């Protein structure tokens, strides 16, 4: 049995998803973007105007929500929502919703199921510490807040959104704060994770580091 899992955690904008996608492509295994799952839930709760303190209604909505990945697309209840979940509002909503126990419970169960039968690269905040505690490889990816803001700003501008660098930096600092201080599965480095600071590194340099790690460890 040569099934194996790679967990990549770190703050927003560290380059996790770009790198994870590359690593998955090179190793020919699946990539699971758990941030996209929190974004999809956040987007739906916002769109349906759900009052987040109405726990019964929240549970009801979660029970009737389906999230899946197909050919790199994020599918929410059968509809592709790639663009809708990438706005600054959706980012904030994802962060807010990710602190709700009901939301985490549902998504973590789904994530474990997705990784159960096949090799995956999974990225997020609590993969190494909670979702896949026995992952074969754990990477904690960081970069300075300024460099992360610069990368995210470029990406948003390319998507045609009007936002300043300072606004993006403020959002990142705010999200780092809520992701690391929330009570439930906060962002932190797993004891057995390899820390990788990507400040000043390009995509292929970071990808190569991880591929080497995996090839040496198998
Ligand atoms: O990684 P991304 O920026 O797409 O994640 C959006 C938000 O979802 C994060 O700010 C975080 O609050 C939440 N998240 C989480 N646990 C994960 C992945 C994402 O709480 N495993």
Image: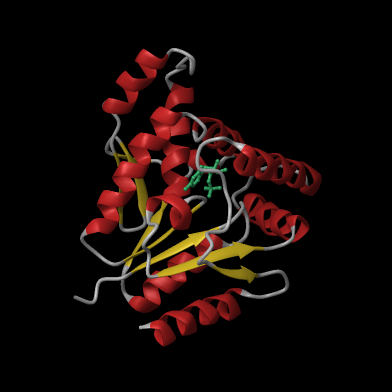
- Image quadrant assignment for residue 132: bottom left
With 71 as the anchor, is 47 left or right in this view? right
Q: Residue furthest right?
A: 166
Quadrant housing the C terminus: bottom left
Residue 122 vs 186, above or below: the answer is below
The residue at the point 50 percent across, 77 percent down is: 210
Q: Residue furthest front?
A: 191
In this rendering, the count of numbered labels is 0
With 10 as the anchor, is 164 left or right in this view? right
Residue 153 vs 97, above or below: the answer is below
Residue 108 vs 117, above or below: the answer is above
- Image quadrant assignment for residue 168: top right
- Image quadrant assignment for residue 215: bottom left
Quadrant housing the N terminus: bottom left
Percent position of residue 51, x then y: 48, 14
The residue at the point 52 percent across, 76 percent down is: 207
User: Is residue 82 something that shows in the picture?
Assistant: no
With 127 as the anchor, is 2 left or right in this view? left
């Amino acid at each position: 049995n040569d099934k194996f899992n790679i967990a990549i955690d770190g703050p927003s904008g560290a380059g996790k998803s770009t790198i994870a996608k590359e690593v998955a492509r090179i190793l020919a295994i699946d990539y699971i973007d758990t941030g996209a799952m929190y974004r999809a839930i956040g987007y739906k709760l916002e769109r349906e105007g759900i009052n987040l303190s109405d726990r019964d209604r929240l549970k009801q909505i979660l029970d009737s929500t389906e999230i899946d990945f197909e050919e790199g697309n994020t599918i929410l209840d059968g509809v592709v929502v790639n663009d809708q979940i990438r706005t600054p509002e959706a980012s904030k909503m994802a962060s807010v919703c990710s602190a709700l126990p009901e939301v985490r419970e549902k998504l973590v169960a789904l994530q474990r199921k997705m990784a159960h039968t096949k090799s995956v690269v999974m990225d997020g905040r609590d993969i190494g510490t909670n979702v896949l505690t026995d992952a074969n490889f754990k990477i904690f990816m960081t970069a300075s807040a300024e460099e992360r803001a610069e990368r995210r700003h470029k990406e948003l501008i390319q998507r045609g959104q009007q936002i300043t660098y300072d606004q993006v930096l403020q959002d990142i600092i705010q999200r780092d704060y809520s992701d690391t201080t929330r009570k439930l599965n906060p962002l932190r480095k797993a004891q057995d994770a390899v820390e990788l600071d990507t400040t000043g590194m390009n995509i292929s340099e970071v990808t190569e580091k991880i591929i080497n790690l995996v090839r040496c460890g198998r």
